[in-house]
Amino acid sequence: MTPATEPGPAGPRGLGPERLREYLDTARPGLVTGAVTGRLIEGGRSNLTYEVTDGASRWVVRRPPLGHVLATAHDMRREHRVIAALHGTAVPVPRPLLLCEDESVLGAPFYVMEYVTGTPYRTAGELAAIGPERTRRAVLGLVDTLVELHAVDPEAVGLGDFGRPEGFLDRQLRRWGKQLAASRGRELAGIDELHGALGRTLPHSPAPTVVHGDFRLDNVLIGGPDDTIRAVLDWEMSTLGDPLTDLGLLVMYSSDLGLTDSPVSTTSAAPGHPAPAELIERYAARSGRDTGAIAWYTAFAWFKLAVILEGIHYRYTLGQTVGAGFDRIGELVPVFIEHGLSTLNELQEG
């Protein structure tokens, strides 16, 4: 735990179980039947997620990080809106219960949703423990769920104004270029070359869809006898845009980094894990979309993760990180750049 999330005398910081109980009794009378306790669910990168229980039922509370400044980066209304819109479609999401924008309750806006039982598989080692057959089923199910998400008609579920699809890829590239500029603390061979090449080879986007923005195995809960996806989580980067950005990110996280004992892992080394080519083929067959330019989207995913990791490394050099493993993040950035360049070269050579 970081100091921001260490338990206080009344539960984890940022939660306030007694104050939460008072609010729930008013907003949803009869929902809670006993004293409320809570715990932080570890693993999130940004917004804070808590499991809350009254001893009989369980719920999940989601709120911005403590001391957050940029409200647009931690928009609880936006997260709640997309989950509420998708609930009842073929996309599995937790049932939203309420949104609270009164910051006097927990110190920030938050929302409450149902607790879904399932496992977020984060590493190849965790997948290896369930065996190759179940691993294959889980990963292919991830692709099928992505197809279902991209099949949702935004207008039909009230998300027609959820984003600005026009110029989506160009804005994304500029956004992450600005992020890179803000965290430049050293020379990074190839990063400008990769950024420039992506800008010169922007593909033509298909029709816009709801985009998750961080679609990967550890952002879903898997459970049940058939290892089905019970819920897709962490919608903080969702918008309307190019659906192939989600696929490119999934392909990147299913590729081999060529590293051992890395603080940033993909799941590709797990026995039974489908190869990226099979994931792309399955998505194309089930969605009907042309994936001929997927190398661009995958290279963009490598670039985006390189920028994110460089930002973490930059904060580490300034002494602004807490915990173990940050000292090794910097050495990963050139690996991501190299993968991005080689992936983009494959597109150009093809």
Image: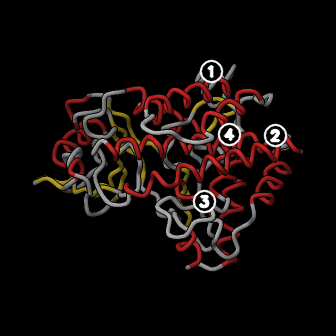
Dot 4 or dot 1: first in sequence order is 1
Within-10-Å neighbours for mark 3: few <14, some 14–19, many 20+: many
Please tell me whether residue 169 is drawn above or below residue 23 in the rendered image: above
How far apart are labels 3 and 4 at the CA level?
A: 21 Å
Q: Whole-Å distance between the Cαs marked 3 and 2?
A: 28 Å
Tell me which corner region of the image, top left, top right, bottom left or bottom right, holds residue 72: top left
- Residue that numbered label 3 is attached to: 229
174 with respect to 251 (left or right) = left
**Residue 32 makes an appearance in the image:** yes
Q: Secondary structure at mark 2?
A: loop
Give the amino acid type for the residue marked by disc 1 in the picture: Arg
The quadrant where residue 268 appears: bottom right
| Quadrant for the N terminus in the image | bottom left
Q: Which residue is mark 1?
A: 164
Q: Tell me the quarter of the picture where residue 46 sits.
A: top left
Check contact, mark 2 vs mark 4: CB within 8 A: no
Q: Disc 4 and disc 1: Cα gap in Å?
A: 15 Å
Residue in the foreground of this view, choosing between 330 and 325: 330
Res. 289 visible in picture: no
